[in-house]
Image (spheres, helix red, strand yellow):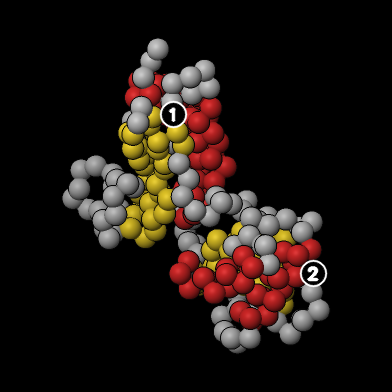
Amino acid sequence: MSTAQELYTTGIREHFAPALRALGFRGWRHSFSLPDDDRWAVLGVQAVHTDGRVRYTVNLSVTDKAAWDRRSIRPDANTRTGLERWHAPIGEVMPVGGEVWWEVAPGPRWLVAVEDSVAAVRGYALPELRRRLRPDDRGPYLLPAALDGVNNALAIAGVARIQRAELADGVLELHGAWSRHDPAAQQVLAGAARGFLSARDRRFGLVRVLDTLGRPLWDFPAGNHGGAD
């Protein structure tokens, strides 16, 4: 029977890496990047070997190529350099909002973890990296730590956390794992929107709530306390 290390190596070489190249990434083994003239958009695979199993996760980073000048290879997303525009583990861009690890162990279903990690890259990591390569790169309105107060209130109500809050063209966008068919989420997020709008930040007059795929769910304009559009 193959060991977990052998299965992991096979899974990355014969399944994970080819799937990422089919999605437009370039690279090999544990480091991949999207082609771009101005920025390194990098995906790194970080593995830990314990107790006859291999656990691995995926890290993401975006770095200006001008800041990476005179370096011969792409940045390593598994190691922070301080030069990144953005750096995050894949769990931060997924609905779980925390650490996500896949485990490869000997057995007939060892490939399931690899296939699931490819699906996570396709559904969450790739769209996020592409979004951060856009020329009109949107700036964060609040960093994750600054959202803790609002997210704690959402957690008490049993509603998914705000994954990120961004300003774009006079609109404050709140992204998270919500559904249009969840009235509790709509009610709690309406209260959160009123809180943001009460700050009277002149840079925006509308709070828009979107799901993790970027699909609009509800709009909360300034001065409207009755609900969403």
Farthest residue, direction top: 1
Question: SS of the residue at dot 1?
Answer: strand
Farthest residue, direction left: 70
Q: Earlier in the sequence, mark 1 or mark 2?
A: 1
- Along the viewing direction, whichever of 73 and 31 lies nearer the viewer: 31
**Residue that numbered label 1 is attached to:** 104
Q: Residue 100, position in %: x, y?
A: 48, 45
**Can residue 131 be seen here?**
no
Q: Which amino acid does the dot numbered 2 rest on?
A: Asp
Please indicate whether residue 104 sits to the left or right of residue 165 in the image.
left
Residue 105 higher or lower than 93, as above or below: above
Q: Residue at x 38, y 51 (%)?
A: 61
**Can residue 115 be seen here?**
yes
Q: Residue at x 42, y 50 (%)?
A: 89
Please indicate whether residue 167 sits to the left or right of residue 99 in the image.
right
**Residue that numbered label 2 is attached to:** 229
Q: Residue at x 77, y 59 (%)?
A: 182
